[in-house]
Image: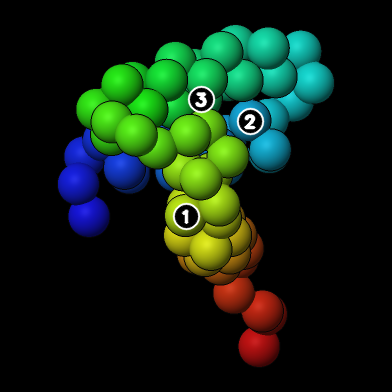
């Protein structure tokens, strides 16, 4: 996975899972990274890019939840 894509996925995860007081900061980071990606992909609309990333975003969020969930007690 490219570092730019990973940064965008991480920013999406953080904006969906942060404390409310940090949402604006994480949302701004996500928007900046998304706009950078749009600038590098000519002819792609915002909606097309978000649709193309939707499954990867959901997969990334699930993976992060599994990492942060403590194992069950024996």
Name the residue: 58% across, 39% down. Answer: 47
Name the residue beneath numbered marker 1.
52
Residue occupying the far bottom of the picture: 74
The 10 Å Cα crowd at callout 2, few under 14, some 14 to 19, many 20 or more, is: some
Q: From the image, state whether disc 2 or disc 3 is nearer to you.
A: 3
Q: Earlier in the sequence, mark 3 or mark 1?
A: 3
Left or right of residue 70, residue 31 in this image: left
**Residue 11 image position (x, y, % from top left):** 49, 32
**Which of the image's four quarters has the C terminus?**
bottom right
User: Is any part of residue 7 visible from this angle?
Assistant: no
Seen from the viewer's position, the closer of residues 50 and 28 is 50
Tags 2 and 3 touching, CB below 8 Å:
yes
The 10 Å Cα crowd at callout 3, few under 14, some 14 to 19, many 20 or more, is: many
Q: How far is mark 3 from mark 1, CA to CA? A: 16 Å
Q: How far is mark 2 from mark 1, CA to CA? A: 19 Å
**Which of the image's four quarters has the N terminus?**
bottom left
Name the residue: 37% across, 27% down. Answer: 38
Which circle marks residue 30 in the picture?
3
Name the residue beneath numbered marker 2.
15
Name the residue: 21% across, 40% down. Answer: 3
Q: Quadrant of residue 32?
A: top left
Q: From the image, state whether disc 2 or disc 1 is nearer to you.
A: 1
Left or right of residue 65, residue 4 in this image: left
Seen from the viewer's position, the closer of residues 10 and 42 is 42
**Residue 29 image position (x, y, % from top left):** 49, 17
Left or right of residue 35, residue 68 in this image: right
Tags 3 and 1 touching, CB below 8 Å:
no
SS of the residue under disc 3: helix
Name the residue: 58% across, 20% down. Answer: 26
Seen from the viewer's position, the closer of residues 37 and 42 is 42
């Amino acid at each position: 996975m490219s570092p730019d894509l990973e940064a965008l996925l991480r920013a999406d995860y953080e904006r969906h899972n942060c404390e409310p007081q940090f949402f604006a900061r994480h949302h701004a980071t996500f928007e900046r990274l998304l706009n950078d990606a749009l600038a590098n992909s000519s002819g792609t609309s915002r909606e097309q890019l978000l649709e193309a990333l939707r499954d990867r975003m959901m997969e990334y969020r699930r993976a992060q939840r599994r990492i942060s969930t403590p194992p069950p007690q024996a």
